[in-house]
Image (tube, helix red, strand yellow):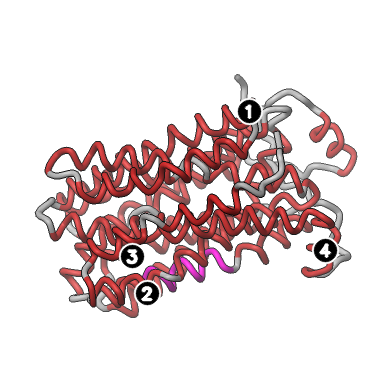
Amino acid sequence: MTLKNTAHPISEQTVPDIEKDTRVNYGIVLVITLVHFSGDFYSSFFAPLLPAFVDKLGLTLTQVGLLTGLVRLLAFMIQPVVGYLSDRYESRWFIFTGLFLAFFCIPFSGVAPNFWVLLLVLCLGSLGSSMFHPATTGMVPLYSGNRTGFCLSIYNTGGTFAFALGPVFITWYVARFGLEAMPWTMVLGLVAFVFCLRYLPRPVSENLSHLGFFKSLKVTMGDVYKTILLIWLVMFLRAITGQAFMTFMPIYLADTGHPLPSVGLIVAFFIVAGTLSGLVAGYLADRTGFKKIFFISHLLMAPALILYLYLPGPFVFIGAFVAGFFVLASLPLGVVMAQKLVPRSRAMVSSLMMGFAYGLGGALSPVVGTLADKYGIETVLFYTAFIPLISLVFIARFPRVT
């Protein structure tokens, strides 16, 4: 596999050739995946360090929920707008500004003197995350030939692997050097930034710049908007449960006696399992269809999360792996299914599935935090684990898409 410098503009004449090519350009897919990995690597620092932030700044669970909710709401609620702009303007500005904000701002959370400064730097980093996700997700189908499901799973694996490696790295780093040394970690992001700046091609627009935001939604979605809504509801319900466990399970683990590096490793097991399941789900969905994979993963999600919550001692690693496998399996499938239904607005529809659903689910974290302060983390997480079962009603109404 050779990788050429393709950072020059792509002319209108070359666009049809890219879209008609049935071969997979793995070189470009991997560069796009590197952008995803690099940004999410820094985004993954937040959750496993929550116990450290709680100890340093004296945060309550309500404040933790508020912090998490605001950060994710800001990051992901604006993704549809960024996706709309990415579909219409052939610019790498969204990607590289977003990547810069992520690797530059988030490391400064370690030196935040109070809750408000912590909120500011994390919000800026999350804003960066919202900028590169839609554009890069929309680019993948252009270079994936007839293997869109598998290539988007590769892309998604970059993010999930980052969320697996990031917690292990940052909890080890903070345990060794302290929170105050976190700004030095931005050096790693700078290296990836320079590499991607050289090799990442310019996104291809959909030539809909003459349309406004809502009119473009109407034109591109047409009669499939009801199906898109069903997919979004399923992704939203999955996000509520996934975000609740990602936010509060590290605190619960620390409260039950696990040291910070152990918490990071448990979170890593959760995400590594999701990395594997995303690839498996994408591979199977390309061959058997999406509906069956959605149904199985969401059916088994609740019992897997209960295992994660209640398995004692070292067995919690097994619970984390099983839970992560089923919670994250359907994440790339919603994006691929939506892109197949709305091919003219790949970035925007991807942002609706990954961004708007994920962000709105995460925005409920203040509610979960308030309930956890009142009833306890364990009780709230137990009932939250059953939310994905509601999504089975909507999955049953999915059309057959292959």
Q: Is residue 112 magenta?
A: no
Per the image, label 4 sits on a secondary structure element best described as helix
- What amino acid type should be assigned to the residue bearing mark 4? Lys
In this rendering, does residue 149 appear at all?
yes
Per the image, label 1 sits on a secondary structure element best described as helix
Per the image, label 2 sits on a secondary structure element best described as helix
The reply, left or right, for residue 29 in relation to residue 115 is right
- What amino acid type should be assigned to the residue bearing mark 3? Phe
Task: Identify the residue at horizontal 69%, vertical 41% (top origin).
Answer: 201
Q: Which mark is residue 366?
A: 2
Give the Cα separation between the discs numbered 1 and 4. Answer: 30 Å
Q: Residue 243 lies in what quarter of the image?
A: bottom left
| Dot placed on the residue nearer the N-terminal end, 3 or 4 | 3
Mark 2 packing: few (<14 Cα in 10 Å), some, or many (20+)? many
Reading the image, the residue beneath label 3 is: 108
Reading the image, the residue beneath label 4 is: 218
Q: Is residue 74 magenta?
A: yes
The x and y percentages for residue 9 are 77, 45
- Camera-side residue: 49 or 199? 49
The x and y percentages for residue 190 are 45, 49
Image quadrant where one finds the C terminus: top right
- Camera-side residue: 98 or 55? 55
Mark 3 packing: few (<14 Cα in 10 Å), some, or many (20+)? many
Task: Identify the residue at horizontal 71%, vertical 53% (top origin).
Answer: 227
The reply, left or right, for residue 263 in relation to residue 256 is right
Q: Main secondary structure of the magenta part?
A: helix
Q: Residue 23 lies in what quarter of the image?
A: top right
| Dot placed on the residue nearer the N-terminal end, 1 or 3 | 3
- What amino acid type should be assigned to the residue bearing mark 1? Thr
Camera-nearest label, 3 or 4: 4
Q: Which residues make up the magenta segment?
A: 67-77
